[in-house]
Image (cartoon, rainbow, N blue to C red):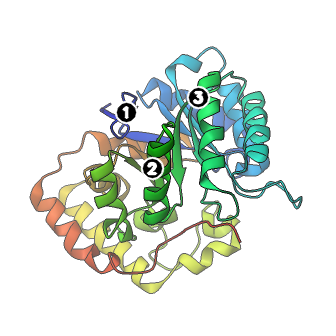
Amino acid sequence: MNYRHLGSSGLQVSALGLGTNAFGKRADEPTSIRIVHYALDSGINFIDTANIYAGTESERIIGLALKGRRQQAVLATKAGLPTGQGPNQRGSSRYHLQQELEGSLRRLRTDYVDLYQIHTFDPFTPLEETLRALDDMITSGKVRYIGASNYAAWELMKALSVSEQLRLSKYISLQCSYSLADRTPEKEWVPLCLDQGIGIIPYFPLAGGILTGKYAADRAPAGSRADTDPNFARFLTDERIQLGNEIGKIAKEVEISPTALSLAWLMNRPAVSTVIVGATRVEQLQDSLQSVSIPYDTDLERKLNDISSRFVHSEPFAEYRLK
């Protein structure tokens, strides 16, 4: 496994990270625990979850999986998206964040998280309040580093400026949708993160499985996102399915799986620190792990850049915002 610094911080994370959105939903508890253990045994140390994944089940299951192995993991979770209908059950106010952090710690069976991320920008709460609350969490020892997710470039830059002005802890990472099917981060986020020492953590690195080629025939395999989540159908555009086919052809030429090839491309992009990939079976994670060691050269990169260049100026594959 290769390890990289998360942004300009001293924290080192595995080039491939484990995303756990499916735990407790498309992957049951025993399977999810096996996946976590296989990830740790394979050198993956970055495990990413959130307080709302599978209605908190993801965090609970990870807490069970890390029993006796907590020190092997760089554990990341998030808060900020709605957890209910109440007026204080969303956003990044001090009230909500402190409440959610305590809940996450309890479910994760730990007294600290390594990376606490704001799930999306909150336009209804002053940044000073959010950043002071996060700084206090670091001072208390319950959080080691902080990160942002689903921030626009100007929102992230403003947050960094406020932190510097008030001498508060700064965000060290940004989660955003980034893949061969969504290269929009290259317009603003990538230059900003390179300049400010922020590590990018792509989510949807396989465009929800589209880049694996399993939707090539415009069908939903049993157990896939499109099969279990009817809302996912909106992502299955002809253009993206065509891209999946083109990646499949290149992958066949070099005798690499489309999954490993797509992930390897993303790992080699500027500012990317770790790529989080989900799994509902250990076999899926085994396939993804090949991305760390495959031969990857400039000719291969050029081919992938060429077939995906139209997605630099397309609409983002996904973004999550408070309404």
Give me the residue at 18% from left, 61% from top.
301
What's the distance in space between the residues labelled 2 and 3, CA to CA?
16 Å
What mark, if any, has residue 127 been given in the picture? none
Apparent side of residue 223 relative to residue 213 in the rendered image (left or right)? right
| Residue 84: x %, y % from top left | 85, 57
Of helix, strand and loop, which one carries label 2?
A: helix
Ranked by sequence position, the earlier of labels 2 and 3 is 3
Question: Residue 138's mark?
Answer: 3
Tell me the kind of residue under disc 1.
Ser
Instruction: Report which quarter residue 223 is drawn in.
Output: bottom right
Chain-order first, disc 3 or disc 1: 1
Residue at the extreme left: 299
In this view of the protein, which residue sits in the foreground, 140 or 105?
140
Residue 61 position (above or below residue 284): above
Residue projecting furthest to the bottom: 238
**Circle nearer the N terminus (1, 2):** 1
Q: Residues within 10 Å of mark 1 (few under 14, many from 20)?
A: some
Mark 3 is surrounded, within 10 Å at the Cα level, by few (under 14), some (14 to 19) or many (20 or more) other residues, namely: many
Q: Give how far apart the Cα atoms at labels 1 and 2 are.
A: 14 Å
Image quarter hosting the C terminus: bottom right
Q: Nearer the viewer, residue 212 or 192?
A: 192
- The residue lying at 80 percent from left, 39 percent from top is 99
Q: Is residue 278 visible?
A: no
Disc 2 designates what residue?
160
Q: Which mark is residue 9?
A: 1
Q: Residue furthest top?
A: 68
The reply to whether residue 207 is visible in this rendering is: yes
Amino acid bearing label 3: Ile
